Image (cartoon, rainbow, N blue to C red):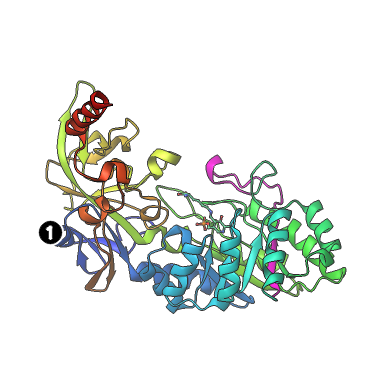
Amino acid sequence: MMRQGMPFFHYRDGTLCAEEVSLAGLADSLGTPFYCYSSAALEAAYSSFAAALVGLPATIYYAVKANSNQAVIATLARQGAGADVVSEGEMRRALAAGVVPEKIVFAGVGKSKAELTAGLEAGILQFNVESLSELQALSQVAASMGRRAPVALRINPDVDALTHAHITTGRADNKFGIDLALAREIAGRQREFPGVAFEGLAVHIGSQLTDIGPYRAAFRKVIALYRELQAQGLALKRLDLGGGLAITYRDEAPVDLQAYAAMVREETEGLDAELAFEPGRLLVGNAGVLVSRILYVKDARQRRFLIVDAAMNDLIRPMLYEAWHDILPLQQPGPDAAHGLVDVVGPVCESTDIFARQRSLPAMGEGDLLAICSTGAYSAVMSSNYNSRPLVPEVLVRGDRHAVVRPRMEYEALIAQDRLPDWLASGATGREGMKAARRRGAAE
Ligand code: LLP
């Protein structure tokens, strides 16, 4: 094993492999940059969480937002996972990947009526509703279809998740969820929502949580409310405890899954509820790497820059959250290899396009390959075409096999996305167009 948390990426014969596939070999055949995921890593992450939950009436709904490649969803679905989706696009992807509608939870703070309709038409398990207005909209849409939408109210328990401010979701000043008082009020007014069947409560307080304390505090509040509403006669049957479990990016000690499950057992003791969990990062984060090639080494006065061919449009976490991602050379450095401080940067014209600042790395030169680690979650999914850079390929490895599960976007496809309006479409543009306009102006 070469790096804590990523046992399925290791050096073999001096070269970094995903399971039994050489990443340098993939770089030769596919070009760089590309994402590579390990099936074994996905399956191991799923089964260790599932194993921890044994004995609980629990279902794992994979939070598709973390990595929505259908091959990834299908790999987890084969293990038994359902899907937690936050848009019609994610729902369609989950369905296309073979997740049955009865195992799809639709979450998200702003589902449009079109999305609510699509979820109802698909017959999904549950809508996690985040506001009174959304509840009214869903009730109307469902009633007009002669249906009752299965609903879990997402509760905002006002608990600090002790994680990065950009990924905390359970505090009163976050936009997510319904506070306890409003949830009680809604429960008392259920008749006003004829298109809704109140089936559960949901809670999710943030992402990359390394501490059990905030979970326990949040669950306790929501479970107390669950019991209270049940006692009032609400036919609740499902409690969705969200996701957020951390992975190791650098040296974080992730939540011990056994301890987490033990805490859930204690808090839900005697509760009449099926449990739902929505992990994303935990299942996929350490199952992927982004492979990139060093284009140029630039020695500036103060710094050495490794300019690589991946950029912030391919992976934005370091820039958006100041996130740390380990960087490994594809060619294994010798035990005594000299290390130096470098900035690893991308080619995008922004000074924030930096993957690592003053990082101690073994000596690497132009043309060398490197892997940016722990990029299975919130990486390819957050990529964009900024600077008109085509989206990069995704590869899934299984043992000694690999498959390109998303090909590199062709320039033709990128260019074909735009349409010229009719007043620009015919003939002259640029200098020619200016001349033509001047001629027209003179003629008028
Ligand atoms: N359930 C809900 C309602 C969520 O909002 C999220 C994530 C999850 C489940 C899954 O959380 P996970 O288990 O993956 O922590 N882009 C950020 C993370 C955003 C998380 C958004 N919500 C990042 O790259 O760190």
Q: Is residue 23 above or below residue 322?
A: below
Looking at this view, name the residue that lies furthest to the front. Answer: 444
Q: Is residue 223 left or right of residue 163?
A: right
Q: Is residue 207 magenta?
A: no
**Horizontally, is 255 left or right of 405 in the view?**
right
Q: Element under label 1?
A: helix
Name the residue that disc number 1 marks: 28
Q: Is residue 208 visible?
A: yes
Q: Picture coordinates of residue 414 (x, y %)?
A: 26, 52
- Residue 43's place in the image compared with 380, above or below, is below
Task: Give, as a single range, the part of the protein colored magenta.
Answer: 147-169
The residue carrying mark 1 has its beta carbon less than 8 Å from ligand 1: no
| Residue 320 sits in quarter | top left
In this orientation, which residue lies closer to the viewer: 182 or 426? 426
Say if the magenta span includes residue 157.
yes
Residue plotted at (60% across, 53% down): 110
Give the residue type that dot 1 points to.
Answer: Asp
The residue at the point 86 percent across, 72 percent down is 233
Q: Is residue 391 left or right of residue 335?
A: right
Residue 5 screen position, x and y as percent? 39, 58
Is residue 186 or residue 24 the one in the foreground?
A: 186
Residue 336 shows in this picture: no
Quadrant including the C terminus: top left
Name the residue at 75% across, 51% down.
Answer: 179
Q: Foreground: 178 or 280?
A: 178
Q: Is residue 251 left or right of residue 259?
A: left
Q: Residue 64 versus residue 12: which sits nearer the camera?
A: 64
Q: Position of residue 395 (x, y in %)?
A: 27, 64
